[in-house]
Amino acid sequence: MTPSPSRSLSRRHFALALPAALLATGCAAPHRGTGRPGDPVVLTLLSHYASGELKKALQGPVDEWNALHDRVKVQTKAVEFTDLLTTFMVRQAAGQGTDILHPYCLWNGQLVRAGVLRPAPPEHAEEIGRGYGTAAVGSASVEGRVYGYPTEMQTYALYYNRRLLREAGVEGPPRTWRELEDTAYRTLRRDRYGNTLVQGFGLSTFDDSTTVGQTLALLSAAGGRFVSADGRSTAIDSPAGRAVLDLERRLVDKGASAPGVNVYQAFASGQVAMVISAGWWTANLKALMGTAYREVGVAPVPLPEADGRRATLSTGFMLGVNTASRHPREAWEFLRWLNSEKVRGATRMSAVQASVGSLTGRADDMRTLLGAGGDPNLHPFLDALAYAVPEPNTPGAQQAKSLLRKNIEALWTGQQSVDEALRSTRRQVDQEVSRSW
Amino acid sequence: MVNATLAPEPTERAAPDTSAAVGIRVRARHRRRQAVVAYLFLAPTLLFYAVFLVLPLGFAVLLSTSRWAGFDLGDIHPVGLDNFAGLFADGSTFLAPILTNTLLFALGTLVLALAGSVLVATCIDKLRFQGLWRTLYFLPIVTTVVAVGNVWKYMYQPGGLVNGVLNAVGLGSVAFLQDPDTALPSVVVVQAWASVGSAILVLTAGLKSIPESYYEAAALDGAGPGTVFWRITLPLLRPSLLFVCVTQFLTGLQSFALIIVMTKGGPGDATNVAALEMYRQAFSYGDWGAASAAAFVLFAVVLAVTLVQLWLFRRKGEDA
């Protein structure tokens, strides 16, 4: 039996088609540039600036860089914030990690542990240490080593509705916890069925960041901290932690706070008198509230006692370079140009952040940019850059934050007492942050 | 001499043997070629299963006994059964409340959806415009979970529709999704509502397959509607009920999209389920080992529950 010509032909075709297909697949891989003369290096940057305004704000300086530089070009990629960490993981595991990453600083420990972030070269680390506030540098560092240029910085302060406070006979924003509680009870309004019409003090359960952020801002104001300085154990089971949880529990028990209601919508609708939140919210409130925004005021986070030392929480993002990048020198140079070189008194990144109503960790830049008629509500956030405490970013920080949120919610809903919540948080978080990776 | 006399004989017998052997070899070669061709035809399917089933399954087994942060494939460290031990360690929330919530969520959804769909399918079977009714009840299935979850979330809010109705009849408001005692049942109701359409579709088809002669005989014997339902309709619906039971329960055990939209697993861990926890462990916390171990525990639960369901129905003489 001799093989038919057609069969041998098809085998030959198959043998030819397979490498051709593989070659075609290889050719379809993303072009990343080689740096040879005539073939510019193409740096890729992955961020969460995916929406219109943010995307446009970042694209401006990137276009400027591309117009000024022939040898190194930058290409931006963006995904929604909720997909950012997952995208880092998937691309990195697939060998498609971008040269420049824009992570939330909470993940830095996780990313450093996984070998994704490259430490900043000494000259850049020095420049970062010199140019940014302590909280910003702390956010961009892991175990004392700087891993990138801090970009968007958020500090927490107290938002209040002037009209609701006025109607309750309260003159100004509270400065102490006693005043905070008193104002919360005085502004509370309910209908005859017990539905809350106006919450005195909004406690958000929207997500990990908002739920934990407000609690950690109060904890910082009370002089406490979530995890120990070395990041190996929790420190919330302390007098300061107990005082914060006691305060929140009292506000819930007395009805001044109704966790579960979307505080971010309710405040904008005039149904919440006070909320502790980050600076990014001002831009959202302006868009949502229109002319009613003039009733919104911002004040520093109240302290347990009037003579206490100011403190609050800060969170942030940074731009770092991937260990897998083939062009780290060029990537760091671009980051220096974007984040350190000043144009008209401020860096390009500061101008980007200011244009979308946000802040960077460069207080001098922000004062220059906000000085000329900016939103006065941003000033308390700017002032807070000087005394804010950075969010812990040790490996396991994201899970520790989720565990804290669960325990806070369990406290607010009466599933746990203050003691139980503190004990449970300590046990669960200690177990997580002390794991050897 | 003997050898010389006998010598040609094997040669004479060898001729047919040789041709038979050649025939066997040809047939064998032909079979081999057929097998090769068959495998070539099967190759795309086998490749598909290898890439999308065997490979991920093997990778999941590896990860469940390793520690991996999800970034670098060269950074997978074997840890034995530590991930499984961690799930059931003292203080772990996986067994209670997470796995308990998963079973309650699936069971609650199954009971509500099954009861509702049997009732509605029986009613539809007696109505005109059956296609229209089936389509109406099927609408939640074609609606995105995000939309369903958000609409119900607003309805459950203290000032929402459900509380509005309660207030209208003189009752106080209930914090459905904020109270840990009511959060899980509230989500179960929505999941059951959203999945009742597909069950109705299956059950109405099952009802159509019941011969009319049984009902005529029952009517002649003077059986009432209750007797007809319990003694004829329900027993003869058993194959459809088995299908609905198995599929609804499996869906319930693996669902988490609705929970993410409505409660994000809260308050606390009140509505946290295994699939949501796995998702968070892997994609938020970068602990793929714990996530994979949890996946295998959930797989064992799903398998056990399915086998029990099949055994229960087979005892009554039904095949899946």
Image (spheres, coloured by chain):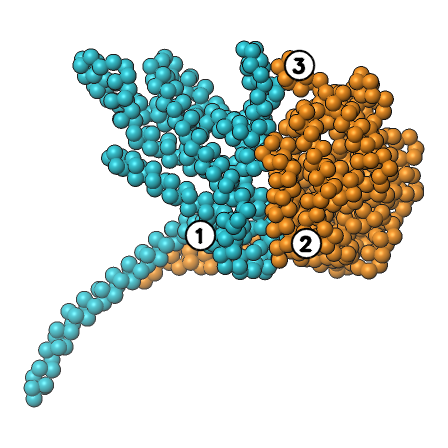
Chain colours: A orange, B cyan
Residue under label 1? B54
Vertical comparison of A124 with B213: above or below: below
Give the Cα separation between the discs numbered 1 and 3. 59 Å
Q: Which disc is residue A191 wearing? A: 3
Q: Is residue A375 left or right of residue A402?
A: right
Q: Are marks 1 and 3 on the same chain?
A: no
Q: Residue at x 74, y 52 (%)?
A: A229
Q: Secondary structure at mark 2?
A: loop
- Please state which amino acid type lies under the numbered disc 3: Asp
Which quadrant is the C terminus of chain A positioned in? bottom right
Give the Cα separation between the discs numbered 2 and 1. 39 Å
Q: Are marks 2 and 3 on the same chain?
A: yes
Q: Nearer the viewer, residue B156 or A423?
A: A423
Residue under label 2? A232
Q: Secondary structure at mark 3?
A: loop
Give the Cα separation between the discs numbered 2 and 3. 48 Å
Q: Quadrant of residue A226?
A: top right
Q: Quadrant of residue A9?
A: bottom left
Q: Quadrant of residue B250?
A: top left
Q: Residue A177: x and y, percent?
A: 78, 32
Q: Nearer the viewer, residue A324 or B268?
A: B268
Vertical comparison of A213 with A105: above or below: above
The answer, for residue A265, to whether it is visible in the render is no
Q: Secondary structure at mark 1?
A: helix
